[in-house]
Amino acid sequence: MDEAVLDVIRNIQDLPTLPSVAMEVMTLAKAPDVSIREISECIYRDPPLATKVLRVANSTFYRRGSQEIETLHRAILMMGLGEVIGITTSVSVLSLLGARDSRGASMRASFWNHCVATGLIARRIDRKLGMKSQGRDFVGGLLHDIGKIILDGYFHDRFEQACELSSRRRCPLHLAEQEVLGTTHMEVGHYLTRKWNLPPYLVDITLHHHHPDKAQFRDLTALVSMADLLAKARDLSCCGDTPPFVLKDQEAWETLVKLGYPMDGLDVERITFEIEDIAQEVEAYITTASEAAPEAAHG
Amino acid sequence: MADYLAFPVPQMTDETFWLLRDFVYEHSGIYFADNKKPQLENRLGLRLRANNLPDFDKYYYLLKYDPQAARELRALFDSVTTNETSFFRSPPQIQAFQEKVLPEIIERRVADGGRTLRLWSAGCSTGDEPYTMGIVVREVLKEAVVGWDIRIFASDISEKALKSARSAQYSEYTLRSVPPEIKRKYFTQSGSQYTVNEEIRSLVDLQYLNFNDAARVRLMKGFDVIFCRNVLIYFDDEAKKRFVAQLYDNLNPGGYLFIGHSESLHNISRAFKLVHFPGALGYKKE
């Protein structure tokens, strides 16, 4: 293995870790026969986490009815287990990596803008295609680029160099990362999601979102990959070059066609226009999520 | 008169906005983003008054179920169309034209040795668009511009608009999106009026053209880029399909069509490749 890659991985050993309860929820969520009660009791063992999850569940972003959701049990009944586990995952990760670094504050803000936008677009397309990803679309979009946060936080100067190189040479960011850092945000994200015991679909999305056809969860990864591109096209990008593209020629699109989704009926223009609306939702989500995560980084 | 002014303007609920937005999109291909709700409310408020209706729900029912709906639809389109035009309108589209499309076409021309550029501003109104195109071409080619044969064909159906375009005089307001150095370079200021310099005017060929004159439109051949922004709303679906198919034929292979920044060709044409540029869409003929 490349000496630089070894170096990266060695240095990553002092990464923040997810709180134990969050780790436990992730493990429980993997069990096929997990009950509502098991999950809610587990989250309640970390009262600040439970409060944050409920706050997000009651935000305008998720809330469906007019009645406030007061317990996790009710949240799961109303929203589904998948959505609540998704909220728990995103709240845990955002608490840990949200606004930690004041040095790269503006990059951090545009980073989360891009990720929330990707999640929201993924969710819209999921509905249009009837994929029923149960919240994994949003969480997948939200966390697909998590490796970038680590690269930016731990290898700030070299990561910036990679971003500049990508813009200058008009090449994809991960190629520039490979050249400057000896690794990519996908590899780092893959390492991190496994270390944190995050659900397998997230491990898959972080590693393969630039080549969804290689993924095990091909439909979800292709969905996030497509949303990632569309978010970048609407200037909701965070770093590196954004070249023009034809969506129908992308691997993500072709993968979804192969999997039998009704891509022909998808109104790409309209989805693109709707991203205008999503930009406002992005603001709202980031506000809620940062309110819900006041005490960051205790790992 | 007093009664007319006193007519209360009802609020448009979000739900009604979504219904009307979908209806307008389905029938015109124009999308009103959430932040355009006040605009739609304003414009359709006038239609509400004209039809003497108490609220927007009733207006929606009229569009959807009334036997007179077709006529009202026409009036609705007229009211949602912005006749306003300005230099560098919809900046992300102009940026895509300047930074991606023109360099791509120029590179191809240089490679095959024919240094010509043919552009068309279809529905050029008072000339802001074709002159903007001229300025952008000049900015991209810089000094090399002398070696090129460049024609920007600009057409409109309104003689009045064409006359104004020929005078090439504009107010400060029309130039509000123009960067100061571009203003200095390509305009001559006299009081509050700005006149486009001869260097740019000489690139632009202004002519009367009715898009219904199929024979003449067919003669427009060999374009590299066509801007046809906020024009298609005036056609019904069938006419739109025919006209867009014609525009496709009017383009060179590798050429681009730009329509209004919130207009869509979904359901109108599948011939083009839809290209996503940062903040803008373009249609490419392959």
Image: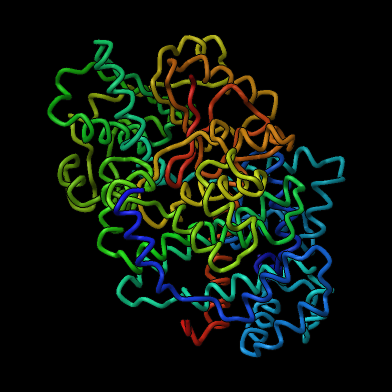
Q: In this view, does A247 lie above or below B255?
A: below
Residue A152 visible? The answer is yes
Q: Is residue B237 above or below residue A133?
A: above
| Left or right position of A231 against A175 | right
Q: Which residue lies furthest to the front in this view?
A: A1
Q: Quadrant of residue A121?
A: bottom right
Q: Which of the image's four quarters has the N terminus of chain B?
A: bottom right
Residue B164 visible? The answer is no
The foreground one among A188 and B102 is A188
The foreground one among A46 and A287 is A46
| Left or right position of A287 against B11 | left
Q: Which residue is drawn at 54% across and 21% down?
A: B211
Colouring rule applied to residues? rainbow
Q: Whole-percent x and y of residue B126?
A: 39, 36
The foreground one among B33 and B161 is B33
| Left or right position of B259 against B27 | left
Q: Residue at x 44, y 40 (%)?
A: B277
Q: Whole-percent x and y of residue B69?
A: 80, 42
Q: Whole-percent x and y of residue A106?
A: 35, 69
| Left or right position of A67 against A17 | right
Q: Which residue is drawn at 55% across and 47% down?
A: A225
Q: Quadrant of residue B155?
A: top left
Q: Which residue lies furthest to the left in this view?
A: B143
Q: Whole-percent x and y of residue B125?
A: 43, 35
